[in-house]
Image: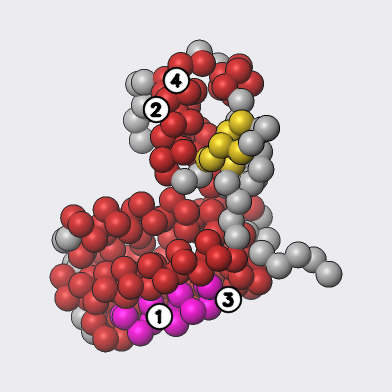
Amino acid sequence: MAVPARASDRAYLALRGEIIDWELPPGSILGEVDQAARLGVSRTPVREALARLTADGLVAAQAGRGLVVTDISIDNIRELFEVREALEMQAARLAASRGETAVFAALEREFVAVPDLLERDDPARHAYYGLVQRFDEAMDDAVANAYLVAALRSLRTHLVRVRRLAKDNPARLSTAASEHLLIVQAVVAGDADLAAHATHVHLHHALASALASTKPAP
């Protein structure tokens, strides 16, 4: 992947990645001066990056604290999944009708191997997240609908943060991989109804897992 030439783009991608990966957890204060020094850029690119993150909904102004990383609440998660279900079930139907079989057959082989992958250390789990990203990209290509893809990509910025809540739950990751496998297999088979149903089941379990992850420890 090419390195962004503009300092503001580099700052945006760096901060966005840290927020999504929970390296900057909710409530983290993002002061221009501190972030500029940490990222090795001037304040202007950081200011532009923070404006973009605010537009994304990842950063918000908080009285007395300045700009902070936004929280993920139970209400946020439920609302995200209401939209996600509508978009992803339709995407699954279209992918089953329009997708290239060879692309999804290759993904099928990778998802079959995920249980062994998740038995390894954290870098292997990052490889799993990369596989999920390639799955999303393959679905985007398959639906051949620019409006639907734009809506999905906007939503995923927040969904990746929610997905990371399960990063310490290998059992859920393994189950999610099995659910993705069923979706891929339905797309390979060209069965739109099965692809949509498999997506519905995956989202039902993903929502339950995300809500459980937000509950405070007893």
Which residue is tagged 4? 45
* Badge 3 or badge 2: first in the primary sequence: 2
**Residue labelled with disc 1:** 200
Residue 189 position, x and y percent, is 24, 82
Please give the residue where the numbered disc 2 appears in the rendered image.
9
**Residue at numbered disc 3:** 208
Q: Please determine whether, in this image, residue 13 is positioned above or below residue 41.
A: below
In the image, which is nearer the foreground, mark 2 or mark 4?
4
* Mark 3 touches mark 2? (CB < 8 Å): no
Mark 2 and mark 4 lie on one chain; the one further toward the N terminus is 2
Where does the image place residue 10, in percent across and percent down from the top left? 44, 27
Whether residue 203 appears in this view of the structure is yes
Element type where label 2 sits in the image: helix
* CA separation in Å, label 4 and label 1: 41 Å
Name the side, left or right, on which 148 lies relative to 51: left
Amino acid type at mark 1: His
| Type of secondary structure dominating the magenta stretch | helix
Residue under the image location 76 percent in, 65 percent down:
216
Task: Determine the secondary structure under disc 1.
Answer: helix
Give the residue displayed 49% in from the left and 79% down from the top: 204
Mark 1 is surrounded, within 10 Å at the Cα level, by few (under 14), some (14 to 19) or many (20 or more) other residues, namely: many
Residue type beneath disc 4: Pro
Cα separation, mark 3 vs mark 2, equals 35 Å
Stretch in magenta = 195-208
